[in-house]
Image (cartoon, rainbow, N blue to C red):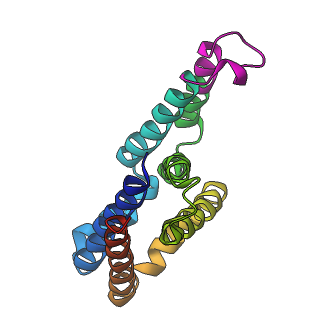
């Protein structure tokens, strides 16, 4: 991933999320859908399934230097696939939140890899700070996923909170999108 795409893609993602929060804060369908997401089986299939597939892809492509126990990544892929499927069966509550956390951590890895070594561009720190904040939040919500439900309840208790957060996220995303074109 290049420096340009490592800055532009998070910016575009934030613009979409910010616009959704800003415009959908007063819409009961959007609010109820977002509030139902932590325990939704559809969100679980999307986020947990997507995170598991991405992780299995990464494990499938590990180098020979990373293989300690086995000679091939196939046993690791099989073990992690069984664990991912067992999680769906045995702990389905808040699995969508954990799936989002997996996706955020894997995306953060790719973004930070794209930013690595670009020390001449101090504007890249706008993305770096965002990514490290996302990593901290992802680890926190992966450990206590019910807090995501509580946070969504608090956020949508007043329409103004969601709109203010949406405006801030949209503005930061626009800033990152502009910064991406200044490299």
Q: Residue furthest top?
A: 71
State the image quarter where residue 161 is shown.
Answer: bottom left
Left or right of 96? Residue 177 is: left
Vertical order, 166 against 96 (above or below)? below
Magenta stretch encompasses residue 72: yes
Point out the stretch of residues depicted in magenta. Answer: 61-80
Q: Quadrant of the N terminus?
A: top left
Q: Residue furthest right?
A: 69
Magenta stretch encompasses residue 138: no
Q: Could you tell me which residue is drawn at 22 percent across and 77 percent down? A: 23
Choose between 20 and 32: the one closer to the eye. 20
State the image quarter where residue 135 is shown.
Answer: bottom right
Location of residue 51 in the rendering, given as x and y in whole percent from the top left corner: 48, 40
Q: Could you tell me which residue is drawn at 58 percent across and 58 percent down? A: 138
Q: Residue furthest front?
A: 120
Choose between 155 and 20: the one closer to the eye. 20
Q: Could you tell me which residue is drawn at 37 percent across and 53 percent down? A: 5
Vertical order, 39 against 48 (above or below)? below
Q: How many dots with numbers?
A: 0
Vertical order, 31 against 165 (above or below)? above
Location of residue 44 in the rendering, given as x and y in whole percent from the top left corner: 43, 45
Left or right of 115? Residue 170 is: left
Location of residue 143 in the rendering, given as x and y in whole percent from the top left corner: 67, 56
Q: Quadrant of the C terminus?
A: bottom left
Vertical order, 51 against 130 (above or below)? above
Location of residue 60 in the rendering, given as x and y in whole percent from the top left corner: 55, 22
Q: Could you tell me which residue is drawn at 54 percent across and 69 percent down? A: 125
Choose between 23 and 16: the one closer to the eye. 16
């Amino acid at each position: 991933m290049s420096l340009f795409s490592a800055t532009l893609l998070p910016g575009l993602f934030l613009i979409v999320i910010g616009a959704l929060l800003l415009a959908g804060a007063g819409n009961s369908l959007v609010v109820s859908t977002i509030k139902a997401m932590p325990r939704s089986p559809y969100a679980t299939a999307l986020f947990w399934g997507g995170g598991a597939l991405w992780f299995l892809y990464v494990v499938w492509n590990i180098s020979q230097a990373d293989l300690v126990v086995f000679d091939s990544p196939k046993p690791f892929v099989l073990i992690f696939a069984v664990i991912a499927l067992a999680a769906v069966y045995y702990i389905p509550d808040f699995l969508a939140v954990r799936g989002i956390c997996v996706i955020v951590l894997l995306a953060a890895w790719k973004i930070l890899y794209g930013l690595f070594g670009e020390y001449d561009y101090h504007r890249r720190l706008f993305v770096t700070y965002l990514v490290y904040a996302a990593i901290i939040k992802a680890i926190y919500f992966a450990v206590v996923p019910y807090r995501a439900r509580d946070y969504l309840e608090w956020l949508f208790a007043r329409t103004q909170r969601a709109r203010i957060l949406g405006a801030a996220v949209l503005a930061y995303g626009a800033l990152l999108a502009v910064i991406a074109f200044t490299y």
